Image (cartoon, grey):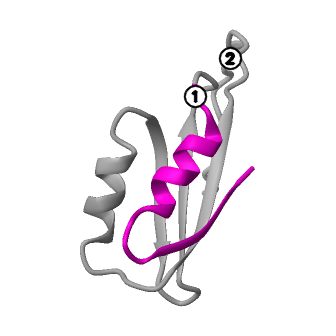
Amino acid sequence: MTTLAVRPEVPEAEELPERTLTVFTARVVETEGLFARVAVQLNPYDVRELRLCFETGTLRAVVEGDGFHAERVAARLNKIIGVLDVTHS
């Protein structure tokens, strides 16, 4: 007997509005307590992703929305001990 999985038809969903995302990356040289320090600096923003890669020593923060100045956020991140060379796109 053969069982065939059939995917149910999904009605057309309403089109979602396009979201504005700003991605910040930085070189990281110190990691003890880093997430706590980053969370304090990014508190008023809509952070969707916060990722730390120990292999490459990099931090990635994705912030949603367009009602803020990315340069100010980058400057805040640059003030954190252990975070260097913040860029955004």
Q: Is residue 83 left or right of residue 30?
A: right
Q: Is residue 69 above or below residue 82?
A: above
Three-letter code for the amino acid on which mark 1 is drawn: Phe
- Residue 29 position, x and y percent, is 46, 86
Residue name at image x 26 percent, y 80 percent: 32
In the image, the segment drawn in magenta is: 68-89
Q: Is residue 89 left or right of residue 21?
A: right
Say which residue label 1 marks: 68
Most foreground residue, 10 or 54: 54
Say which residue label 2 marks: 16
Q: Nearer the viewer, mark 2 or mark 1?
A: 1
Most foreground residue, 69 or 5: 69
Do tag 2 and tag 1 residues touch (Cβ < 8 Å)? no
The earlier-in-sequence mark between 2 and 1 is 2
| Circle 2 residues within 10 Å: few <14, some 14–19, many ≥20 | few
Residue name at image x 32 percent, y 70 percent: 34
Residue name at image x 35 percent, y 80 percent: 31
Camera sees residue 6: no
Q: Residue furthest bottom?
A: 55
Three-letter code for the amino acid on which mark 2 is drawn: Leu
Element type at marker 2?
Answer: loop
| Residue 78 falls within the magenta-colored stretch | yes
Q: CA distance from mark 2 to mark 1?
A: 22 Å
